[in-house]
Amino acid sequence: MGRYLRPTSLEAALSALADGRPTILAGGTDHFPARVTNAPDEDILDISALHGLHRIAIDGDTVRIPSLATWTDLIRADLPPLFDGLKAAARQVGGVQVQNAGTVVGNVCNASPAADGMPGLLALDASVELASAAGRRAVPLADFVLGPRKTARRPDELALGLRIPLSALPARATFEKLGARRYLVISIAMVAAVAEFSPDGRIARARIAVGACSPVAARLPALEAALAGKFPDPSLVMADHLTPLSPIDDIRAPAGYRRSAALELVRRAVAGLAQPEAAAA
Ligand SMILES: Cc1cc2nc3c(=O)[nH]c(=O)nc-3n(C[C@H](O)[C@H](O)[C@H](O)COP(=O)(O)OP(=O)(O)OC[C@H]3O[C@@H](n4cnc5c(N)ncnc54)[C@H](O)[C@@H]3O)c2cc1C
């Protein structure tokens, strides 16, 4: 029978991780469903009683989403339009109960190819803050999630939170998700788009990421380059721009359907960048 640890201080949590490498538990919305039929004998480090890790805050030119901030905390946070796409994704994670319990950081650490937070966070250039008894480090999100259920986190490390740079230019952000039904569904494909705009309304910099169509959500650098200097226009999106994707056949959809759905979702996400109200849908 494993031990159940619920420390209240970060120091105690890091020391438990250094000693025994327990499994970290945050909201439990991925952890518990994965153990319904086969509960492993493991030590649990429940981090839900740690202080000071709930509040999403703007710190200078950075937004910090700490490890206990839930999807509901994100939806309610007072953030600039740059975050509208990530908030739209938050509203589509499970139902309200799951949004109340599940954390944004847990979504990332679980490293599911279908994690709805990943495209938006990649498009926001997020990095992951990691802490261990030996010290702290920051890893760009693109280097943190390495494959399905695989991250660059060492077993003695806790993810403290996510850091996202604010934009100096006006920005807009959108999110599009396709599932087999409208709500409470694992994604077949999802797309996040972020654009920073020059004063003339052209895109100064675009960041587009697609989820559930590759082992890890992927940015589309050729499309991002093609959009720079242009007004948001879905006709600029070409099938070739989706080359980084490698969709598979699975229980939710065949690969070919995923690829064509992703193309349509990318076009809709780019079209949405032209309409500030689109991201709030
Ligand atoms: C009914 C239902 C519907 C769902 N719908 C969706 C959906 O639509 N879209 C979607 O993307 N997800 C969905 N999920 C999955 C889940 O809700 C999210 O992935 C959630 O954000 C996970 O956060 P959590 O705090 O519950 O993580 P937990 O279950 O506590 O942990 C998840 C994993 O991350 C690790 N972990 C958590 N926090 C840390 C940390 N601070 N440092 C290091 N490792 C950590 C844990 O060890 C575990 O491996 C759904 C789940 C349920 C039960």
Image: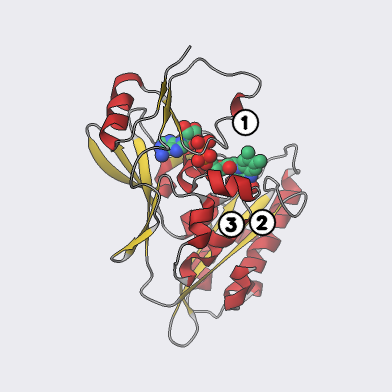
Identify the residue at horizontal 51%, vertical 39% (top origin). Answer: 27
Percent of width and height locating residue 125 = 41, 58
User: Tag 3: residue type?
Assistant: Ala
User: Which one is earlier in the sequence, the residue at label 2 or at label 1?
Assistant: 1
**Disc 1: CA contacts within 10 A as few (<14), some (14-19) or many (>=20):** few
Alpha-carbon span between mark 2 and mark 1? 22 Å
Quarter holding ligand 1: top right
Q: Is residue 88 above or below residue 127?
A: below
Which element carries disc 3, helix, strand or loop? helix
User: Which one is earlier in the sequence, the residue at label 3 or at label 2?
Assistant: 3
Identify the residue at horizontal 49%, vertical 82% (top origin). Answer: 202
Left or right, 104 with respect to 211, comes to: left
**Disc 3: CA contacts within 10 A as few (<14), some (14-19) or many (>=20):** many
Percent of width and height locating residue 76 = 50, 61
Q: Mark 2–mark 1 contact, CB under 8 Å?
A: no
Alpha-carbon span between mark 3 and mark 2? 8 Å
- Residue hosting label 3: 89
Which element carries disc 1, helix, strand or loop? helix
Q: Of 61 and 273, which appears nearest the observer? A: 61
Q: Mark 3–mark 2 contact, CB under 8 Å?
A: yes
Identify the residue at horizontal 32%, vertical 31% (top origin). Answer: 13
Q: Of 221 and 97, which appears nearest the observer? A: 97
Task: Confirm if mark 2 falls within 8 A of ligand 1.
Answer: no
Res 33 label = 1
Task: Confirm if mark 3 falls within 8 A of ligand 1.
Answer: yes
Alpha-carbon span between mark 3 and mark 1? 21 Å
Q: Quadrant of residue 88?
A: bottom right
User: Which one is earlier in the sequence, the residue at label 3 or at label 1?
Assistant: 1
Query: From the viewer's perspective, is the residue at label 2 or at label 1 nearer?
Result: 1
Res 177 label = 2
Query: From the viewer's perspective, is the residue at label 3 or at label 2 nearer?
Result: 3
